[in-house]
Structure formats: structure tokens, C-alpha cells
Amino acid sequence: MSTPFRSGFVALIGRPNVGKSTLMNHLIGQKIAIMSDKPQTTRNRIHGVLTQDEGQVIFLDTPGIHKPHSKLGDFLVKTAQNTLSEVDLILFLVDAAEGIGPGDRYIIHHLKQVKTPVFLVVNKIDLVHPDQLLPLIDQYRQLISFQEIVPISALKGNNAVTLLNLIFKQLPEGPKYYPPEQVTDHPEQFIVAEMIREKVLQLTREEIPHSVAVVIDEMKLRPDKELIDIRATIFTERASQKGVLIGKQGQLLKQIGTRARRECERLLGYRVYLDLWVKVKKDWRNQVQLLRQFGYDE
Ligand code: GDP
Ligand code: MG
Ligand code: K
């Protein structure tokens, strides 16, 4: 008898520096770390997808709710609120070494307005004496009730497996929303490369064979988190193909770039600056180096 596959969406919230990223990295490890959007909903930033035999967890960030003084105002707060009511589970991370702060109260205020189950995840327990934990937990419990309370250290890994098991237990039976093979080391780069390739094929039709390859040379979020810079190279096998792709006065390449950029922005949830190049590379498929850049070998 096989146990049912469980899957669902889990929102991670907590004030800055509470350890959300650390927890994500610990749970997901090298397996995945993506930042592409779930296409159906706007602005729900996917931080990572964890796929195991027993199920799949899609972790979502909830932008806007972390900052009580966010200038983005109502809109983001509403979006965050919607996210919180749509997900299957909310992980509310708090800091074991600090008392309840204004940021925590602000989040609790929002949690009270949704019916979604909430786990209180008390992180950084490695920094406190166990005696300190219960009083803190009691304080939180007086403000709002929790489905589970899990003390962890995301940094050291204490109780991470326990937390994961409780998450799986909470999720409904469901499908694999994301194919495991999409889950590579750098899936966001893979997806962006595929999108650019798709635009090339759409705009050139039969002139360019499907052997055209796209490599993402660089993909970086700017420090102000306003824009993602993407530098990509389209490889063709012959010089004549390169000419076709670029087009008269670069018109076709420009068009490819514009369409690809728009789609990248939609998928990634950020503004994108796309720098597109075309190079000729014979037999690129045989070149291990390139395959590695494609992410097949890492
Ligand atoms: P985020 O802003 O919520 O994503 O927080 P981060 O994951 O970036 O963590 C903020 C800081 O807290 C980093 O310096 C982490 O190394 C540290 N940190 C995270 N989890 C733990 C923990 O369990 N124990 C300790 N001692 N430090 C932690
Ligand atoms: Mg973080
Ligand atoms: K995103």
C-alpha cells in the first residue's frame, strides 16, 4: 500500500533577519532555489520547491507584509493578505532570542484575518537557554492560536526534519505542481533560456532550426532589488543563421529581446534588463563546457 502524495503552498512570513532564507536553504539545500512566479497568481514570489517521495512543498514569500512602514501601501498588503488566505499553510517565523516586537505584532494582526492554519516556528533556539523558550511561546499563544509550535535552529538544523514532517502532514493530497526535472540547480536560468529560445523559434519560423541554443551568461538582481540584469547568448551553428537572427539593422534580434524580456518580467516578477548576443558555435551540442553552462551537469 502506498501513502498518498501530498502537495501544497506554504507561505513563509516573519520580520527581516528572523531566518527565513536560512530555513529555506536548509530545507531545500542544493536541490532547488527558484524565484519564478506561479503563473496563475500575480506577485506571489516562489522562493523554492521541495520535492520528496511523500510530497511537494512550494514555499512562497509574501512581499509587503514584512514591513510595517512599507511605502507600497495598501496594494501590497492586500496582495499579501490574499496570498495568506490562499495558501495551505503559513509558517510564522519568530526569533527565540528576542521578545515580541512591533514587526511580529503587525504580522499577527494580519494572521488573525485569515483562516489558514499557522505554525509558530521559533527559530534560533541555539542562542537561548531552553528555560527561556516556554515563556516566549506563552506570550505568542496569548495573542493568537497555532496549529503547531516548532522550535528550531535553521542554522544548525535542529528540528528541521520534525518541521518538515509536520508540514507534509498538514498538506492535502495533491499533484506535483512542478515537475521534478524542472528542479535543477538553477531552474530560473533554465526557464529564462527556454523562453528566449521560444521567442527565437516563434519569430524566425523555419529559417532557424531547433538546434539553436541559448545560454544565460549572467543573471543578477541589482542591489536595490529593482531590476534583474540578464545577459544571454544565442548560439547558432552557421554564420548565415546568425545573420537571419539579427535581421536588418538588428531589427529581428531587438524584437526577440523585447518579447523575451516581457515574458521574463511576467515570470520573475521583476523588471528585467535583457542583453542579448548571437554567436556562431559549430557542434555546440558536443561541447561539455557548454552543456555544463546549460545546467545538465551541475
Ligand atoms: P531572513 O531575513 O528572515 O531571510 O533571515 P536570514 O535567513 O537572512 O538570517 C538572518 C541572520 O540570522 C543570518 O545571519 C543567519 O545566519 C542568522 N540565523 C538564521 N537562522 C539562525 C539560527 O537558527 N541560529 C542562529 N544563531 N542564527 C541564525
Ligand atoms: Mg531573506
Ligand atoms: K518571482
Image (cartoon, rainbow, N blue to C red):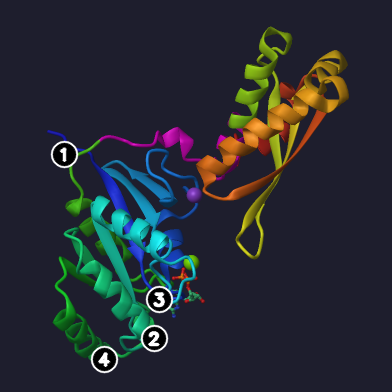
Residue shown at 76% from the left, 23% from the top: 252
Q: Quadrant of the N terminus?
A: top left
Circle on res. 127:
2
**Residue 144 image-quadrant placement:** bottom left
Q: Quadrant of the C terminus?
A: top right
* Kind of residue at badge 4: Gln
Question: Could you tell which of marks 4 and 1 lies nearer the N-terminus?
Answer: 1
* Kind of residue at badge 2: Leu
> Which label sits in the foreground, 2 or 3?
3
SS category of the residue bearing label 4: helix
Circle on res. 132:
4
Mark 2 CB near ligand 1 (8 Å cut): yes
Q: CA distance from mark 2 to mark 4?
A: 10 Å
Answer left or right for 239 relative to 298.
Answer: right
Residue shown at 66% from the left, 53% from the top: 220
Q: Is residue 213 visible?
A: yes
Based on the picture, tell me whether residue 183 belongs to the magenta stretch: yes
Mark 3 CB near ligand 1 (8 Å cut): no
The residue carrying pointer 4 sits among few (fewer than 14), some (14 to 19) or many (20 or more) residues within 10 Å by Cα, namely few
Dot 2 and dot 1 residues touching (CB under 8 Å): no
Question: Could you tell which of marks 4 and 3 lies nearer the N-terminus?
Answer: 3
The residue carrying pointer 1 sits among few (fewer than 14), some (14 to 19) or many (20 or more) residues within 10 Å by Cα, namely few
Q: Kindly identify which residue carries mark 3.
A: 68
Q: CA distance from mark 4 to mark 1?
A: 39 Å
Dot 1 and dot 3 residues touching (CB under 8 Å): no
> Which label sits in the foreground, 4 or 1?
4
Position in image of residue 187 (x %, y %): 53, 41
Q: Identify the magenta region.
A: 175-194
- Whether residue 88 is situated above or below residue 195 in the rendered picture: below
